[in-house]
Image (spheres, helix red, strand yellow):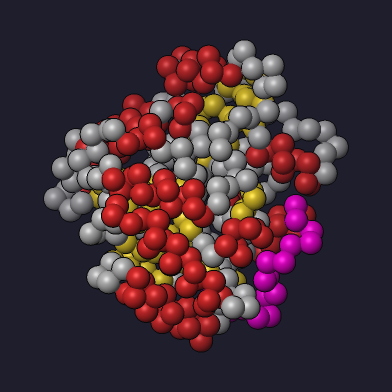
Amino acid sequence: MPFIPHRVFFEDGSLDYPIAQKILDALKSNPRVSVNILKPKQRIKTISGASWQDAYEAGKRTLVVGIRKTLNFQSCKPSAHYQLPLVTGCMGQCEYCYLNTQFGKNPYIRVYVNLEEILSQTASYIEQRKPDITIFEGAATSDPVPVEPYTGSLAETIQFFARQEYGKFRFVTKYTDVDSLLNLDHQGKTMIRFSINADHIISNYEHFTPALPKRLLAAGKVAAAGYPLGFIIGPVILFDNWETEYKRMFKALRNNLGSNKPDNISFEVISHRFTARAKNTIMNVYPSTTLPMNESHRKYKYGQFGYGKYVYQPEQIEAITSYFRQAIEDSFPGAGIDYII
Ligand code: SF4
């Protein structure tokens, strides 16, 4: 599922970097891609008079190539110590996506070309915490895999971490174009996780993403290449028959991984949650969504970045926790569970 943007914008100064040149070379001769080179302080042109839906669709097909100016990395609980900013945004259109809180109507995909500076800042963070290990998350505000053919940033980053004694890298994806990562010298320092879910959730809410069997096939390749492998199951939604459907998902997982199942597989489980801002975006873009977003059925929880979330009630979280603990133990005895939230 390759990402082909409809519009690409090069921010001022970005073309001084080889990654930007590589992107320009890849897209400039495609007649279906509008290539724009921005002048200093010139902003990305929004489509005038566009409806929410049209603006959102256009945003998801817009690639912005820029220089990451802020090199203060955000914290990234519970999966890592810091976010590693390589990419923000994603071509996928999952209705529930957590990015809906951040990007609203113009969800551009933004790649940063000053990779050397970003990695040198990463090295400083590692240095500050050593001898403790510092873990960096490469997908905190994106799915970085669809733009990897254009940037090669994940490959560079994986090789950078192979050389770090006190640093580790991890990212999560729903996408499957992982072949360019398979032969890298990763030294086991990068964990690749796949985001999976029950078929009911994938087919109803995860538009423009690969189906479960394709994700599992890619996971098998990553495991065979010796990468530590993880799965994020989420968002867990309590729809009718959820237990039976998730059971089916675990069966598919066991069958597909087969002999590629590594010993140190790990799981993260995230129950469905939404913010007021995300609900507003979702209702504008998917007015007939069936996502369960009735605030009165949920518990309000204050969040890390100052905005609260509507989460399931404590007894529902308890049901999710005990179900997934058991299901993971039954399917993958001894597998690690990083958290169930
Ligand atoms: S694949 Fe992930 S990042 Fe992309 S839209 Fe879906 S949930 Fe959001």
User: In front: 32, or 154?
Assistant: 32
Using the image, determine if residue 163 lies above or below residue 279: above
Position of residue 273 measured from the top left corner of the image (x, y, whole percent): 57, 68
Does residue 183 appear anywhere in the picture?
yes
Position of residue 210 measured from the top left corner of the image (x, y, whole percent): 55, 47
In the picture as drawn, the residue positioned furthest to the left comes out as 131
Position of residue 12 measured from the top left corner of the image (x, y, whole percent): 56, 19
User: In front: 234, or 301?
Assistant: 234
Task: Please tell me which residue is depicted at 41% across the width and 71% down the height of the picture.
Answer: 340
Q: Is residue 135 magenta?
A: no
Classify residue 224 by image quadrant: top left
Task: Please tell me which residue is depicted at 35% across the width and 70% down the height of the picture.
Answer: 331
Task: Please tell me which residue is depicted at 49% across the width and 53% down the height of the picture.
Answer: 213
Horizontal side, residue 181 vs residue 252: left or right: left
Horizontal side, residue 119 vs residue 200: left or right: left
Position of residue 36 measured from the top left corner of the image (x, y, whole percent): 65, 19
Does residue 308 appear anywhere in the picture?
no
Which quadrant, please, contains the N terminus?
Answer: top right
Which segment is the magenta one? 285-302
Tally of numbered tags: 0
Task: Please tell me which residue is depicted at 64% across the width and 42% down the height of the picture.
Answer: 107
Using the image, determine if residue 14 lies above or below residue 247: above
